[in-house]
Image (tube, rainbow, N blue to C red):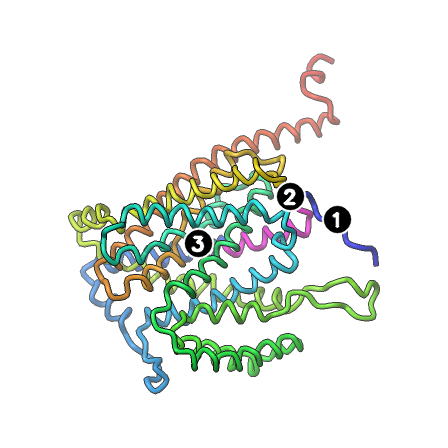
Amino acid sequence: MSSPPPRPALFARGSWPETRRITAILRTETAGGTLLIIAAAIGLIWANTPWSSAYEALRDFQVGPAGLHLNLSLETWAADGLLAVFFFVVGLELKREFVAGDLRDPRRAALPVVAAVGGMVGPALIFLAFNLGNGDAVKGWAIPTATDIAFALAVLAVVSSHLPTALRTFLLTLAVVDDLLAVTVIALFYTDELHLPYLGLAVFPLAAFTFAVQRRIRSPWVLVPLAVATWWLVHESGVHATVAGVLLGFAVPVLTTRSGVGDPSAKDPGLAEWFEHRIRPLTAGFAVPVFAFFAAGVTIGGLDGLVDSLTDRVTLGIVVGLVAGKAFGILLTTFLTAKLTRAELDSDLSWIDVTGVALLGGIGFTVSLLIGELAFADQPRWEDHVRIGVLAGTLTAALLATIVLRLRNRVYRRIDEEETRDDDNDGIPDIYQQGS
């Protein structure tokens, strides 16, 4: 078997298999992003109707075994349980990118990695600037730092009929690193009480799960109980249960060696892709929309309530952080890295394209709402303001990104049409065709 072709240069247009993979992810995330938006809209509208009490009763309805400390509300089950499944897929995606994707090559990964870091630092600083001296409000510094990949890719897919593949690759890589940073922040800064015995016990089912998947065991009768045990022990330890999802995702092998067939060094897709293919529809079509339905249901309280929320320092810090902080942080760090190092943008891209992606980074829905719940669990007023701020900031960032990227899409569409005409003319420019 011949060796695989060399990887393209930094952020160059991807190979056909790479393009197909990105397209498949975009299609899936587009559907998931659409469902997310619909579910969030239903929750927000229902919470502001005369039937809001029914919504609150549903959201607060408790179910689960009390003996295991799992008699939780449906809202908590969505945040701790369903999002753990979502973060399991995030863990699979992270590991695949580190082992076999763009993050494997430091040169290819340089710009989106530093862009993700800048996109975290910028909004955090802006939020702190708005809320210094505002008591415990500073605990929400990480709320505007996260990018919602499903929502962002849904917007990109709608406007990207002619945008280069390199732009999608940049956004995907940035979002993957952003997810890793978000998980790290949740684990380090939003764990109020740590119970080490439970955390230590979680190592055993996690190790057993790791051993099973490394042996290519796919039986749900083996893997699901081990995953649930890991999740419960992490949940009881005080660390947010979504971290268990990421750890379980990291345990799954990405590549498997084919033995005795052709080139022994050749690699086949491993269990990570198998799991992702089967579980992603569950997260995109159910887990994330259900979380969005419960998380977005804030009672605004009419025009006066909306004005009060939007003028609150917490809300302003989130909105400005998502819209301006994300864009400025991503652009500045990307520009400085490109100027001061050997990392370069793909030749097909311009800085206006990166601006569009930077604005998309301000779409911070799912993880931002989760961090808001963790930061202000004992502050109902601020928790409501967080939801309004995240919704307002996300919609503003999405609108601005759509305007920029649609303008760029028109430019690339003209380029594609000119190239098509040249091909129809056997490569002879129009000016010579007309003069012949």
Mark 3–mark 2 CB contact (< 8 Å): no
Residue type at mark 3 is Asp
| Foreground of the two, 328 or 322 | 328
Classify 10 Å Cα crowding around label 2: few (below 14), some (14-19), many (20 and above): many
Classify 10 Å Cα crowding around label 3: few (below 14), some (14-19), many (20 and above): many
Q: Is residue 212 above or below residue 171?
A: below
> Which one is earlier in the sequence, the residue at label 3 or at label 2?
2
Callout 1: helix, strand or loop?
Answer: loop
Residue designated by label 1: 6
* Mark 2–mark 1 distance (CA, rounded to whole Å): 12 Å
Residue type at mark 2 is Leu
- The residue located at (83%, 55%) in the rendering is 2
**Residue 232: in magenta span:** no
- The residue located at (35%, 73%) in the rendering is 193
Residue type at mark 1 is Pro
Quarter of the rendering containing residue 73: bottom left
> Which one is earlier in the sequence, the residue at label 3 or at label 1?
1
**Residue 23: in magenta span:** yes
Residue designated by label 3: 148
Q: Which residues are magenta?
A: 11-29
| Foreground of the two, 234 or 298 | 234
Residue designated by label 2: 10
